[in-house]
Amino acid sequence: MPTKGFLAELSQLIVSEKNQHLDVVIMPWKQVMQGVESGDLDGSVCMFKTEERKSRMYYIEPPLLIEQTVIFHRSDQIPQVTKLEDLNQYRMGILDGSSYHKDEFIQQHPKLVDVNSFESMFKMLDKGRIDLILAEYRNGMAVISETASLNPNHFSVLPYSYQHTDVHLVISHKIFDSQTVVQKLNSVAKRVINSPEAKALYKRHNILQLPKLKPLSLQ
């Protein structure tokens, strides 16, 4: 997209309040993670909050969005899933470097397929090279609707969610004077996110409401 998406635009609103410019570069997710951790990137406009990541990046509060991780499948092939362990019988695509990639269940999954982009994952699902995709609802729906070679009618979501997670703008610990940068952004973020300009962004990007799904439990 010309504006690089809702999260980039909302983050730009926050940063511009402190008379700074945000230069957003689209790159593979694993490269984003490595860049933020090393300080080669100042931060990221899209990051889930985990305890493990807090040691390497500062989270601007409040979150930009609340996201839900769900299970996508082909509409003509409905998986028999009622509990977490049922996912083990299927070839499941997952974005390389995603936060839940380090979950014990995911690491032990016998048929996990690491993929470096959402678009590639959904093309693999469409062609039957994988059976399921574990991904954020809004990211998945955006890829399905915006990729010309994909038919939205070919995809569905199971009635279970894997997790709910906050989506944040983050700043790397490694950049110069990072704590001061974070303090300045935190001081304006809540006001900006609730401003008329931000509400107009939500409306213009037609941010999807999350579906009401049951948590996918162990039992």
Image (tube, rainbow, N blue to C red):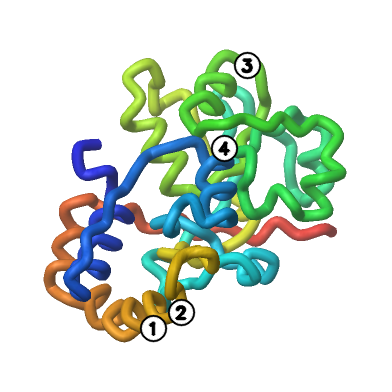
Q: Nearer the viewer, mark 3 or mark 1?
A: 1
Residue 218, image quadrant = bottom right
Q: Mark 1 and mark 3 in contact (Cβ < 8 Å)?
A: no
Residue named by callout 3? 128
Q: Residue at coordinates 78% horizontally, 51% vertically from top-left? A: 83
Q: Residue 179 has which mark?
A: 2
Crowding at dot 4, Cα within 10 Å, few <14 / some 14-19 / many 20+, comes out as: many
Q: Of residues 84 and 97, which is closer to you in this image?
A: 97
Amino acid found under the numbered disc labelled 2: Gln
Q: Identify the element where label 1 is drawn.
A: helix
Q: Position of residue 99 (x, y in %)?
A: 63, 54
Q: Which mark sits nearer the N-terminus, 3 or 4?
A: 4
Amino acid found under the numbered disc labelled 3: Gly
Q: Position of residue 18 (x, y in %)?
A: 21, 75
Distance CA(mark 2)–CA(mark 3): 47 Å
Q: Of residues 209 and 133, which is closer to you in this image?
A: 133
Q: Which mark sits nearer the N-terminus, 2 or 4?
A: 4
Residue named by callout 4? 72
Say whether residue 46 is left or right of residue 31: left
Does residue 166 show up?
yes
Q: Identify the element where label 4 is drawn.
A: strand
Does residue 202 show up?
no
Distance CA(mark 2)–CA(mark 4): 39 Å
Say whether residue 75 is left or right of residue 186: right
Q: Which quadrant is the C terminus positioned in?
A: bottom right
Q: Is residue 148 above or below residue 191?
A: above
Q: Which mark sits nearer the N-terminus, 1 or 4?
A: 4
Q: Which mark sits nearer the N-terminus, 3 or 1?
A: 3
Distance CA(mark 1)–CA(mark 4): 38 Å
Q: Identify the element where label 2 is drawn.
A: helix
Q: Mark 2 and mark 1 in contact (Cβ < 8 Å)?
A: yes
Q: Is residue 192 above or below residue 108?
A: below
